[in-house]
Amino acid sequence: QVQLVESGGGLVQAGGSLRLSCAASGRTFSSYAMGWFRQAPGKERELVAAINWSGGIMGYADSVKGRFTISRDNAENTVYLQMNSLKLEDTAVYYCAARRSSNYHLTPSEYDYWGQGTQVTVSS
């Protein structure tokens, strides 16, 4: 069992930056692929970024490429999402998820563990 706790969300002006963190419990964190997802009101949950077990392979949604960076520290059991040049449309609840696989997947249903989410609100 893996427990995930997100932090770092908040209110930021458009063009600003935030760094989300996701702390994981358990000794198997380094064997899991990790993903960041988001869900805005009235919309489906969507992948933002994902990373494989070693941190060597990352994937991003087209809407965040060049602005967001996912990374992980397996020694600290933590995955990060650095968000720069934030836009109004980035406003959502952001979730961290773990997949019992070395490789990430684009689909939320492929992930086995989820955090409780952290709100990111971008204002004009």
Image (cartoon, rainbow, N blue to C red):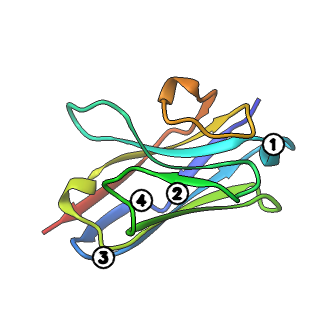
Q: What is the secondary structure assignment of the residue under circle 4?
A: loop
Residue shown at 50%/38% (left/top)? Answer: 116
- Check the image and name the residue furthest to the left: 124
- Check the image and name the residue furthest to the right: 27
Label 1, on which residue? 31
**Answer yes or no: do the residues labelled 3 and 4 have beta carbons within 8 Å?**
no
Disc 3 marks a residue whose amino acid type is: Gly
In the rendered image, residue 98, in percent from the top left (x then y), is placed at 64, 38
- Check the image and name the residue furthest to the bottom: 16
Residue shown at 70%/58% (left/top)? Answer: 55
- Which numbered mark, 3 or 4, is in the foreground of this view? 3
Disc 2 marks a residue whose amino acid type is: Ser
Q: Residues within 10 Å of mark 2 (few under 14, many from 20)?
A: some
Of callouts 4 and 1, the N-terminal one: 4
Relative depth, front residue between 7 and 83:
83
- Check the image and name the residue furthest to the top: 109
Q: Classify residue 29 as left or right of residue 4.
A: right
Label 3, on which residue? 16
Label 2, on which residue? 7
- Which numbered mark, 4 or 1, is in the foreground of this view? 1
Label 4, on which residue? 9
Of callouts 3 and 2, the N-terminal one: 2
Hey, which quadrant is residue 2 in on the image?
Answer: top right
**Answer yes or no: do the residues labelled 2 and 4 have beta carbons within 8 Å?**
yes
The residues tagged by marks 1 and 3 sit, at their Cα atoms, a distance apart of 33 Å
The residues tagged by marks 3 and 4 sit, at their Cα atoms, a distance apart of 13 Å
The residues tagged by marks 4 and 1 sit, at their Cα atoms, a distance apart of 26 Å
Residue shown at 49%/30% (left/top)? Answer: 108
- Which numbered mark, 3 or 2, is in the foreground of this view? 3
The residues tagged by marks 2 and 4 sit, at their Cα atoms, a distance apart of 6 Å
Q: What is the secondary structure assignment of the residue under circle 3?
A: loop
